[in-house]
Amino acid sequence: MDTVVPELAVQQYDASGLHEQREDVLAVYAEVYADELDDPFYSLPRYWERLLAYAARDGFALITGRLTSELIGYALGYTLPEGSGWWRGFQGDVDPALLSESGHRTFAVNELMVRPAQRRRGYARALHDSLLHNQPETRATLLVRPDNTPARTAYRSWGWYELGKLQPFDDAPVFEAMVLELRT
């Protein structure tokens, strides 16, 4: 599961670390979503609100990747709590037990992003693997936009599969909900 990218300095943080990394994290986000920042769902204030909500959850982890001192990407997520609303808005025909959370079964990968100029060098995989490496959950989930072909292709090549579609908020796009078995 480990991917070696020698020049990438990877570090893990908890919720307080997210606050310490705020400016750098928002700068990467603003670069990645530059064309969509006028959409209220993708605005910087709304994104920071989502990050704060994620950071308040049990099991929150932030992995940063730096080249020299520049943050080039990050991954973050948390453990879905018992009775989580994560699957609210799910569209698909699956066993309802797959959408019920126990508080220790599923790790939600909320973000995985790399600055455009640094993509296709293995950095996303290194951040992904570092985030999931020691998670105690048996599976992970994430949401990806159906039109994000590079990300969808990468996730599938890393073992993720689509469970169905999901619209997490009324003003959010419809995403593909993907799952990765971490251990059986």
Image (spheres, rainbow, N blue to C red):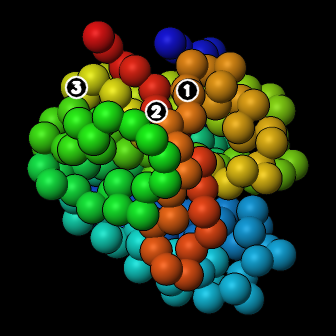
Few, some or many residues within 10 Å of mark 2 (<14, 14–19, 20+): many
Q: Counting residues from the N terminus, which is met first, the one under dot 2 or under dot 1?
A: 1
Question: The C terminus is located in which quarter?
Answer: top left
Q: Are marks 3 and 1 in contact (CB under 8 Å)?
A: no
Q: Give above or below for 56 relative to 144.
A: below
- Disc 2 from disc 1: Cα separation: 5 Å
* Earlier residue among tags 2 and 3: 3
Q: Which residue, given by chain and number where applicable, does mark 2 sit on?
A: 179
The amino acid marked with disc number 2 is: Val
Q: Position of residue 51 (x, y in %)?
A: 41, 68
Residue 160 badge: 1
The residue located at (75%, 62%) in the rendering is 32
Q: Would you say the residues marked 2 and 1 are in contact, meaning their CB atoms lie under 8 Å apart?
A: yes
Report whether 135 appears left or right of 49: left
Q: Is residue 119 left or right of residue 163?
A: right
The answer to whether one can see residue 48 in this image is: no
Q: Is tag 3's residue or tag 1's residue first in the polypeptide sequence?
A: 3
For the image, the number of numbered tags is 3
Residue at 49% across, 46% down: 92
Residue type highlighted by circle 3: Pro
Name the residue that disc number 3 marks: 136
Residue 162 drawn above or below residue 52: above
Task: Bin the neighbour count of mark 1 within 10 Å (Cα to Cα): few under 14, some 14-19, many 20 and up.
Answer: some
Q: In what element is the residue under mark 2?
A: strand
Label 3: state its secondary structure: loop
Q: Position of residue 112 (x, y in %)?
A: 58, 47
Q: Amino acid at mark 1?
A: Trp
